[in-house]
């Protein structure tokens, strides 16, 4: 089986590539990535020489390139993760999100349709999407996003992801392309770019820089260990039903401020500092425009139908994550240098 994984040099993609390369020695895994600021081949050092792994640098927005790639490789499956993913960046540069997330997804769908025209037997196009397409839930209510929740995207990022989900379903409905979609909550773990809340704050605590909590800090997210997401992607890709959607989440809601306090204390402990000292770095700052109040996933369908559930509790996963960032300073220095450095310094210094 020849599988195209897009965005495999990013955070979640690198965990998916590693899982597939190690678990399926008989598959050929092709990782297509543009290596934007968020893509980093250092995330995949341990598998880069594997005989079943190939990396190709390329842009999914380039229609001709994508068509040629499909003609050359005759993929059996596509697991599509490549995207622009940071909500704050989508507010300042929405067009880039439209191009990569919508046009990029369209190019892949169209190439799959053309190249699988003779037979779709054994083929599958899997779009890895987000819970943000469902909009926002109220704080303090016991409500959850299910697979039936109507789409209500509210940031340029989630609007672009919602649009790409619609194109994926339209290609199934109109052309019978065999597709599957999953919508997942916030991931955390190793190799996440340090613009996202958890790695940014671990790094800032280490460097005794301020911790910019947006608004009142009561925004709530449902956090999932990235390796559990990668396992879920493996299960959905192999066992999910054609045309279905699966929500993936951690049953693990935290307000940002509670999470930040927990991170402060854990990092203090790990660094042998006085516990509580990092909390002094917390600074409430101007809110993110259009900030979604709360996300929470009902992941009962994937558990019931495919037998997946998270494997690790949050405090264990968070501690492992903190230890990983504290002991991988080289990785952090590398990804925060170059092009990203200017952005990082402008945003966070
Ligand atoms: P990321 O930003 O860490 O990585 C994205 C990857 O895509 C990078 O390697 C980048 O180089 C690549 N890429 C970007 N534009 C490209 C282009 N035009 N052509 C080819 N490659 C390109 O993202 P992530 O957090 O790993 O997210 C991966 C996917 O999972 C995304 O589709 C995202 O919407 C989805 N998702 C993320 C989360 C989360 O919490 N991070 C949760 C749910 C769903
Ligand atoms: O829900 C899934 C989504 O989770 C993914 O689809 C996105 O790609 C991913 O980036 C993530 O989006 P969020 O906006 O929820 O993640 P982020 O880490 O940017 O922010 C988490 C919360 O923390 C959010 O409420 C905003 C807040 N925040 C974030 C940063 C970077 C702060 O208060 N301060 C910050 O400096």
Image: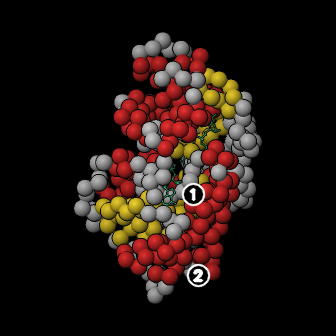
Q: Which residue lies under the disc numbered 1? A: 129
- Distance from label 2 to label 1 (Cα)? 21 Å
- Say which quarter of the image contains residue 331: top left
Question: The N terminus lies in which quarter of the figure?
Answer: bottom left
Element at badge 2?
helix
Question: The C terminus lies in which quarter of the figure?
Answer: top right
Q: Is residue 65 left or right of residue 173?
A: left
* Residue 146 numbered tag: none
Q: Which residue lies under the disc numbered 2? A: 175
- Say which quarter of the image contains residue 210: top right
Give the vertical position of 176 relative to 235 (above or below).
below
Q: Is residue 329 left or right of residue 341?
A: left
Q: Is mark 1 within 8 Å of ligand 1?
A: yes
The residue depicted at 42 percent of the width and 53 percent of the height is 9
Q: Which residue occupies the foreground of this view, 139 or 7?
A: 7
Residue 309: horizontal and vertical position, in percent?
Answer: 49, 49
Residue 192: horizontal and vertical position, in percent?
Answer: 47, 42
Looking at the rendering, the quadrant in which ligand 2 lies is top right
Give the vertical position of 218 relative to 129 (above or below).
above
């Amino acid at each position: 089986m020849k599988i195209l994984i897009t965005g495999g040099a990013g955070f979640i993609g690198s965990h998916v590539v590693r899982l597939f390369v190690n678990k399926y020695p008989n598959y050929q895994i092709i990782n297509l990535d543009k290596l934007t600021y968020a893509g980093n081949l250092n995330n995949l050092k341990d598998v880069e020489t594997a005989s079943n792994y190939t990396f190709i640098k390329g842009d999914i927005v380039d229609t001709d390139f994508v068509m040629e790639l499909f003609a050359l490789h005759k993929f059996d499956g596509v697991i599509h993760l490549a995207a622009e993913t940071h909500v704050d960046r989508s507010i300042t540069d929405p067009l880039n999100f439209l191009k990569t997330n919508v046009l990029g997804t369209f190019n892949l769908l169209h190439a799959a349709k053309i190249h699988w025209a003779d037979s779709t037997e054994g083929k599958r196009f899997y779009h890895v999407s987000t819970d943000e397409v469902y909009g926002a839930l109220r704080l303090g209510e016991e409500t959850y996003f299910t697979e039936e929740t109507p789409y209500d995207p509210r940031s340029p990022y989630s609007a672009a992801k919602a649009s790409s989900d619609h194109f994926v379903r339209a290609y199934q409905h109109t052309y019978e392309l065999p597709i599957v979609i999953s919508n997942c909550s916030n991931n955390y773990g190793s190799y996440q770019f340090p613009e996202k809340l958890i790695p940014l704050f671990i790094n800032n605590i280490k460097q005794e820089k301020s911790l910019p909590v947006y608004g009142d800090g009561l925004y709530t997210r449902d956090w999932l260990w990235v390796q559990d997401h990668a396992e879920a992607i493996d299960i959905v890709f192999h066992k999910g039903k054609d045309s279905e959607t699966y929500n993936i989440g951690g049953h693990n809601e935290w307000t940002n401020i509670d999470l930040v306090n927990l991170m402060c204390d854990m990092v203090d402990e790990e660094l042998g500092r006085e516990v509580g000292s990092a909390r002094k770095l917390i600074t409430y700052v101007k809110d993110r425009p259009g900030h979604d109040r709360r996300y929470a996933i009902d992941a009962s369908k994937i558990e019931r139908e495919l037998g997946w559930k998270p494997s690790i509790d949050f405090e264990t996963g968070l501690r492992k994550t903190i230890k990983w960032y504290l002991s991988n300073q080289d990785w952090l220095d590398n990804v925060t240098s170059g092009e990203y450095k200017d952005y990082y310094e402008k945003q966070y210094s």
